[in-house]
Image (cartoon, coloured by chain):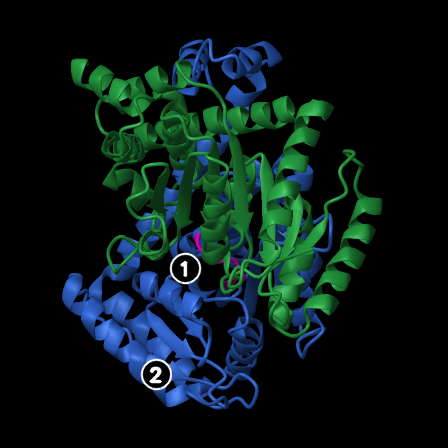
Chain colours: A blue, B green
Amino acid sequence: MNDVRQLARRVEGGDLSAVARAISFVVDERPGSEELASELYRRSSSVHKVGLAGPPGSGKSTLTGRLISYWRGQGLKVGVLAVDPSSPVSGGAFLGDRLRIQDHAGDPGVYIRSLATRGRVGGLTPTIFGAIHVLEAAGFQKIIVETVGIGQDEVEVAHAADTVLYVVTPGLGDEIQALKAGIMEIGDIFVVNKADLQGKDKAVADLRRALAIGAEASPADGWAAPVLATSALTGEGIAALGEMIERHRDHLDSSGQRSRRLKDQLRAEVSLYLARRISRSVEKRLTERHLSALVERKTDPVTLGQELLEARGAA
Amino acid sequence: MNDVRQLARRVEGGDLSAVARAISFVVDERPGSEELASELYRRSSSVHKVGLAGPPGSGKSTLTGRLISYWRGQGLKVGVLAVDPSSPVSGGAFLGDRLRIQDHAGDPGVYIRSLATRGRVGGLTPTIFGAIHVLEAAGFQKIIVETVGIGQDEVEVAHAADTVLYVVTPGLGDEIQALKAGIMEIGDIFVVNKADLQGKDKAVADLRRALAIGAEASPADGWAAPVLATSALTGEGIAALGEMIERHRDHLDSSGQRSRRLKDQLRAEVSLYLARRISRSVEKRLTERHLSALVERKTDPVTLGQELLEARGAA
């Protein structure tokens, strides 16, 4: 109890080793972590969260590095959460490592953490939300949430961020193009990265065309998602991207959508917290005998689930 | 009630339009879907499920097409569930469509369905499991579960399948290589697809080396994951892959691991079913007033979650 309070105070003082410890605490759900999360949440306020999604190979890590430098140049403290589907067993956390060895090691205004998610069924978001709240409490002014995953991982990043950048490159394969077409609606800003490569202009034009079609299909929220070209390698286009991110933020504020997004994030957070907690408690009551009855098809998952639910005080 | 029974009987008769309807029923969680799921589950038995994971561009769809032909050649009925992270809004279901326009349209021994998952927070697995049980009831003898997603989606495919193929190609970028290194442990069989491309031998050797290191790190389950080369384009290596899949199946049976995996799948299914159900019921009770209190940081997600849990009969 006292320890948790003390850790909370050190986080609020911006102590990076305390930040690291607090995130581990929350992510690993150690005893006292719920108290810590409550404490930190109530004493801090919400920070602008920028999500990075897009296929592997689109250069999201390098772009993240550029955005860190851009915001550091404005004197802002930047936290990065890299949602990393690789495993803790066989060498996870590579993203965070790769970022760490770059320019920002030793800068007390930057904190980079990768969150390994591999192997967890049922979503990673409770972990992201908890880590975000620690960074908010520690006074970070921009939070980048980045994922190397495609699919569910991107959905969850989109649900945790205020402004979602969708990053692609010229000349990715057909399958990625098709995939891209399917995930249009999660991006607030589209970035054609590696603008030094051939095919940039075509990629930008293709995306703009696809977005125009999408915009007709879905209700306007007063924001036409722009397409920007960047080269994370040379730094080209980064300042324009930074400005566009601020414009989106202003748009969220002035249109009242910021509060709507925040509420959606919080709804997801509460819901996932409960789902995780309850399913864990029910799982404990799932005996080998239950599982055998399922394998033998004497009962079924729905019926058994309902029975377990009725038998409990499930928390 | 009567309708549900009737639909169940038609599914069991192998009627493909009934199969399609039953899967929609279960996936969309329409009224009566739980009854349908129970009914079908209890009257059928478990089928060998083969999962396909791997980065976009590795040719999983084409490989799926080849495996369908291979098993059709042995007279087996094959069901395919393509877990598709693209959206229903802007053109999801492309995978299923692409498969469908290939060789197997009109073959009553093949059923292909894509399950759009985009936009759902908290995992897609309840949907996969439900659809699998429909296919089991309809008498399919092989079920392929394929995903285009990377990260969480792969984890979930791995949790739904008995034999997981991890598909890569020679010469994918660095990021994908790193990703690959992180997800070694979900594959039972590794496939270097597009063996017609340059770099095949190196890719096979690299993978074997990485797997040998991994095998030392993790406890032996008596199965050393093999690496095979295929060309889905020419059909090269498909028969050998088919035989290896059967060998893995035999290994699961003879080692007793089949039943272990089945129980793990069922545990995940029950747990996710409950998580979804409970979070939905709690979400209904999350009012605008609760959300405003969260935004203003007068309460926090953990405390509010616990209060909602205590206030309920949460189901």
Residue bearing the label numbered 2 = A204
What residue appears at the point 53 percent right and 16 percent down from the top-left corner?
A: A295
**On screen, residue A186 above or below B33:** below
Image: B19 above or below A150 = above
The amino acid at mark 1 is Ala
Point out which mark residue B259 bears. none
* In the foreground, B12 or B286: B12
Residue type beneath disc 2: Val
Quadrant where the image shows the N terminus of chain B? top left
Q: Which residues are magenta?
A: A145-151
Check contact, mark 2 vs mark 1: CB within 8 A: no
> What is the crowding at mark 2: few (fewer than 14 residues within 10 Å), some, or many (at least 20)?
many
Lower position in the chain sequence, tag 2 or tag 1: 1
Please tell me in which quadrant of the rendered image residue A148 appears: bottom right
Residue B81 figure quarter: top left
- Badge 1 is on which residue? A161
Disc number lying in front (2 or 1): 2
Q: Position of residue A13 (x, y in %)?
A: 62, 59
> What's the residue at 51%, 74% (across, down)?
A58
The alpha-carbon separation of the residues under discs 2 and 1 comes to 24 Å
Placement of B135 over or under A188, stated as above or below: above
Give the x, y percent position of residue A16. Answer: 67, 61
Toward which corner of the image does residue B248 lie, by quadrant?
top right
Viewer-side residue, A265 vs B34: B34
x then y, percent, for residue A134:
55, 53
- Between B18 and A302, which is closer to the camera in this rendering? B18
**Is residue B168 something one can see in this rendering?**
yes
Under circle 2, the secondary element is: helix
Q: Give the secondary structure at mark 1.
A: loop
> Label 1 is found on which chain of the structure?
A
Residue at (27, 35) in percent of width and height: B20
